[in-house]
Image (cartoon, rainbow, N blue to C red):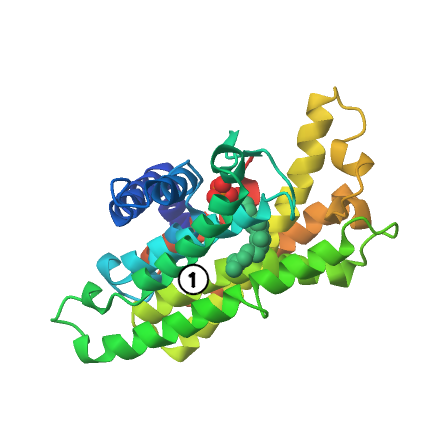
């Protein structure tokens, strides 16, 4: 325990996530030129993509590649791709026909700045760009496992496609929309379905794709999939808890915004204490999946799980 504690304190998570975010931002910045016509479309894509964001999904992808012994360059195009998918889902989620939000990452939403048609099309073009990145077979240095790389790329593309469509993000969004405005609170199994699809499925794909491209064994990939499912749900449970605790702080410790709003959340269904216990259980499930890996190589995924559990936004 003493040695794992010291390994944990030696790992500088802030520096790690900062370094990965910078590297991915460089790839994202280079992948869309504002000078190429149609200028408005490209501007809108860049506006959405380069507006900040924690870059958790690319970091997960790169960390999963590293834990199975892969090199960072092998997973870098995929790390960019998962962030692009995430961004396009936010652009579409913010549209008036969906959540109708005016602000995202502290800035006016894409459709507020560029209008609805361009925001829809920027989202479409970003989705297509993500698969362009995924298909970059040239990301493998020719020295190691080069012959295996195209098969890994194809497997990763299938993984990403599945997590987006009617078995993934889109399914989660549809069920979420169906529940919106209903007078009844959403039952817990529906709430879990929404989170597993809207949030966890892309986090899962980010990890699994990193592990595939890093050359992980099927057994390693499946262990990391379980890790990712736990942190995916954890992400949302913590989000719900923060919603309550933050708005309570803002309102001077009176009833939280979330408890008063129509939105169904874990604290609403389980209470705050039980929601916190559930979050702890998900974190320990995630950590357990990492126990068979080399400690040093597992440090980034371990700290990413802790970050998701203990973040303040
Ligand atoms: C994907 C084809 C396709 C269509 C989109 C709109 C839609 C279908 C799905 C909605 C997906 C959605 C908005 C899920 C919520 C995801 C989530 C947890 C967002 C917050 O993620 P953070 O905290 O955000 O990582 P930052 O800004 O840090 O990147």
**Can residue 60 be seen in this snapshot?**
no
Residue shown at the point (40%, 55%) measured from the top left: 125
Seen from this angle, which residue lies furthest left?
143
Residue 129 position (above or below residue 221): above
- Apparent side of residue 309 relative to residue 175 in the rendered image (left or right): left
Residue 102 position (above or below residue 163): above
Q: Which residue is mark 1?
A: 207
Residue shown at the point (31%, 68%) measured from the top left: 213
Relative to the observer, which residue lies in front, 302 or 178?
178
Seen from this angle, which residue lies furthest top?
252
Residue 290 percent across, percent down from the top left: 45, 62
Query: Circle 1: is it few (<14), some (14-19), or many (20+) Cα within 10 Å?
Result: many
Residue 77 percent across, percent down from the top left: 29, 58
Residue 134 percent across, percent down from the top left: 33, 64
Residue shown at the point (69%, 32%) measured from the top left: 245
- Apparent side of residue 71 relative to residue 208 in the rendered image (left or right): left
**For the residue labelled by badge 1, is the local secondary structure a helix, a strand or a loop?**
helix
**Can residue 267 be seen in this snapshot?**
yes
Residue 65 percent across, percent down from the top left: 32, 62
Number of numbered discs on residues: 1
Q: Residue 44 is drawn in which quadrant?
A: top left
Residue 257 position (above or below residue 31): above
> Where the C terminus falls, by quadrant?
top right
Relative to the observer, which residue lies in front, 208 or 34?
34
């Amino acid at each position: 325990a003493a040695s794992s504690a010291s390994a944990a304190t030696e790992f500088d998570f802030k520096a790690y996530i900062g370094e990965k975010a910078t590297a991915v931002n460089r790839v994202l910045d280079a992948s869309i030129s504002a000078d190429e016509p149609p200028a408005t479309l490209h501007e809108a894509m860049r506006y959405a993509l380069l507006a900040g964001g924690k870059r958790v999904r690319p970091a997960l992808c790169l960390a999963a590649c590293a834990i199975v012994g892969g090199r960072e360059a092998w997973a870098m195009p995929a790390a960019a791709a998962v962030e692009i998918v995430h961004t396009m889902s936010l652009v579409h989620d913010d549209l008036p026909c969906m959540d109708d939000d005016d602000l995202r990452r502290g800035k006016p939403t894409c459709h507020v700045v560029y209008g609805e048609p361009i925001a829809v099309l920027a989202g479409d073009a970003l989705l297509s760009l993500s698969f362009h990145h995924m298909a970059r077979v040239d990301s493998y240095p020719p020295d190691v496992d080069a012959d295996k790389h195209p098969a890994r790329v194809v497997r990763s593309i299938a993984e990403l496609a599945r997590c987006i469509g009617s078995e993934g993000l889109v399914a989660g969004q549809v069920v979420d929309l169906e529940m919106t405005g209903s007078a009844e609170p959403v039952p817990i199994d529906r709430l879990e379905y929404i989170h597993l699809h809207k949030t966890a499925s892309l986090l899962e794909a980010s990890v699994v794709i990193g592990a595939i491209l890093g050359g992980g064994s099927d057994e390693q990939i499946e262990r990391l999939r379980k890790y990712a499912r736990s942190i995916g749900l954890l992400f949302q449970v913590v989000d719900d808890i923060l919603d309550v605790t933050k708005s309570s702080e803002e309102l001077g410790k009176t009833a939280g915004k979330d408890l008063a709003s129509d939105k169904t959340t874990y604290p609403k269904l389980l209470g705050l204490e039980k929601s916190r216990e559930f979050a702890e259980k998900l974190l320990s499930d995630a950590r357990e999946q990492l126990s068979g890996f080399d400690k040093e190589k597992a440090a980034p995924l371990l700290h990413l799980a802790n970050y998701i559990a203990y973040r303040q936004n």
